[in-house]
Amino acid sequence: MAILSGCAAEPAPLATEPGVSLAGRTNIAVAPASNDTGQNYDFDLTGTFTEDLKSALLAKGYTVIDTKAAPPDALIIQCSFLSYVPGNAAAKIVGAGRSEARVKTTVVDQKTGQVVGDLLTTKQIGGLGFPLLALGPGGVTALPTVGGYKTILNNVADNVATAIDRKIKGY
């Protein structure tokens, strides 16, 4: 029951089990994301993403609680990275160095322990194709496009939060 989301402006909808309604849910517990890529990274991939997702859900008005203290009416959000490529800032200047992330999200009903929905989100942020330029005392300088790994994690977290929000609100 997975839905694939790519570079489209609209995030994919959260697919739920037949007959399941998430209407009115306000308590959401975000479990620590897992890294199922088989790769190690030079920053805290899962911790950064988990915090981004919590922030995105808080911004939408949800009560984000610890999974260990989740009340029975809570939804537990479990995310796992299936693939992740942080990209290369220097390569992005010439249009290469794409950042990519593929994350599986599972929504579990705290009371029953049953999976009630899932979502597969795939995002890519490509190179710019042209350099960013800055004019300084030494003339024109090409600027590196750093932080792409943060941008893509934020984009995926926002898409997951939006999909959950739309399902809870019934659209």
Image: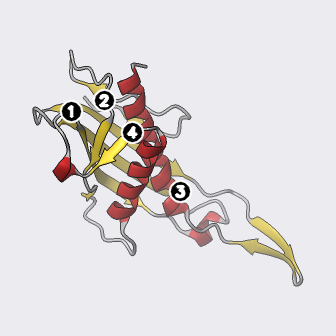
Q: Residue 73 carries which label?
A: 1
Q: Is mark 2 on a helix, strand or loop?
A: loop
Three-letter amino acid code of the residue under disc 4? Tyr
Vertical arrangement, residue 128 with respect to residue 140, above or below: above
70 horizontally vs 101: left or right: left
Out of 37 and 23, give the one closest to the viewer.
Answer: 23
Residue 24 in percent (x, y) is at 32, 24
Three-letter amino acid code of the residue under disc 1? Asp
At x 20% / y 44%, what residue is drawn?
A: 70
Out of 164 and 27, give the one closest to the viewer.
Answer: 27
Out of 128 and 33, give the one closest to the viewer.
Answer: 33
Residue 143's image quarter? bottom right
Query: Pointer 3: what residue?
Result: 151
Q: Is mark 1 on a helix, strand or loop?
A: loop
Query: Pointer 2: what residue?
Result: 25
Task: Evaluate if marks 3 and 1 touch, with contact meaning CB atoms under 8 Å apart.
Answer: no
Task: Evaluate if marks 4 and 2 touch, with contact meaning CB atoms under 8 Å apart.
Answer: no
- Tell me the quadrant of the picture where the N terminus can be found: top left
Task: Evaluate if marks 4 and 1 touch, with contact meaning CB atoms under 8 Å apart.
Answer: no
Q: Which mark is residue 62?
A: 4
Task: Evaluate if marks 4 and 3 touch, with contact meaning CB atoms under 8 Å apart.
Answer: no
- Tell me the quadrant of the picture where the C terminus can be found: top left
Q: Residue 53 carries which label?
A: none
Q: How far apart are marks 4 and 2 (CA)?
A: 9 Å
Callout 3 environment at 10 Å: few (<14), some (14 to 19), or many (20+)? few
Task: Evaluate if marks 1 and 2 touch, with contact meaning CB atoms under 8 Å apart.
Answer: yes
